[in-house]
Amino acid sequence: HAVAVVANAKAIVEHFAKCGAPRQRFRLIPNILDTREFDEEARRGFPGKIAWEPTETIIKVARLDREKDHETFLRAAARVSARRPTAQFLLAGDGAERARLERLCQKLDLTGRVFFLGEVTEIPALLRTVAIGALTPSRNEGLSNTIMEYMAARLPIVATDVGGNRELVDPPRGGFLVAPGDDSAIAEALVRLLEDPLLRADMGVHNRARVEREFQPAIIAGHFCSLYADVLRGAGR
């Protein structure tokens, strides 16, 4: 019965349209990422005590639950490590899957290559210390704040092609999209980026420019003002 419904990704609109919701009532308005605030937080530095090599490190920021499919990411990490022994992997986030994933790391011989950081509040500062951002959920992804933070940090992205990930990653300019559950494809994309610093840099520049152009507070506020004006005029009734 809503006059208007805000969705942050085309994938969300498509999902509810298939469920029977009136498509014309939806307004697509993305999330906000304030680059000025992001950069201020990044400059404070990351207080972690574990050292890793920034140009060889891949990060995945996500809670540790089944939906985020860390298992596939770790299997991809094992493939990458076999070809590039200097690669390192960070998992920022915590959850019920942690103990199982730590056991999987031992089974895959990833001890000393994968670091479980737990809950991290200094994400902008942490992202300055890595080379690639990854997000590999199996399903249910809207417009990911994690991917937007990767973009703001000038990182190339490897993500699964679910939900709104395609709308942010913008392949091939901003990164690579792979099928959910395909650890081989994830590994191939990660290795290619590790081996090509110029490609990483180009993707990072593209991603940062998009954040500055599309997701700043004033821009999103304008979208909402337009929506409210339409509602007040009775549009969509």
Image (cartoon, grey):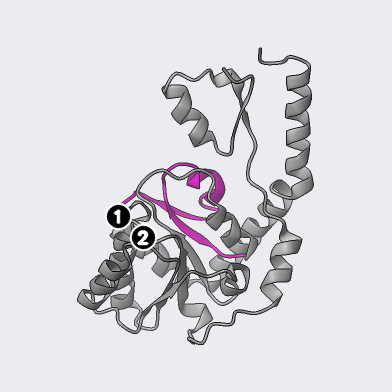
Q: Does 166 lie within the magenta span?
A: yes
Q: What residue is shown with label 2?
A: 186
**Residues at discs 2 and 1 in contact (Cβ within 8 Å):** yes
Query: Which region of the structure is painted magenta?
Result: 154-180
The location of residue 109, given as percent across then percent down, is: 24, 79
Q: Residue at x 33, y 68 (%)?
A: 98
Residue 109 appears anywhere in the view: yes
In the image, residue 209 sits, relative to residue 25, either above or below, namely: below
Q: Is residue 99 inside the magenta stretch?
A: no
At which x and y percent is residue 144?
53, 50
Q: Is residue 139 left or right of residue 223?
A: left
Q: Name the residue type under label 2.
A: Ile
The type of residue carrying mark 1 is Asp
In the structure shown, which secondary structural element does the residue marked by tag 2 occupy? helix
Image quarter where the C terminus lies is top right
- Badge 2, how many Cα within 10 Å: few under 14, some, many 20+? many
Q: Looking at this view, is 38 or 84 the one in front?
A: 38
The quadrant of the picture occupied by the N terminus is top right
Q: Which residue is mark 1?
A: 182
Q: CA distance from mark 2 to mark 1?
A: 6 Å
Q: Is the residue marked by circle 1 packed among few (<14), some (14-19), or many (20+) residues within 10 Å?
A: some
Name the residue located 66 percent from the left edge and 59 percent from the top edge.
208
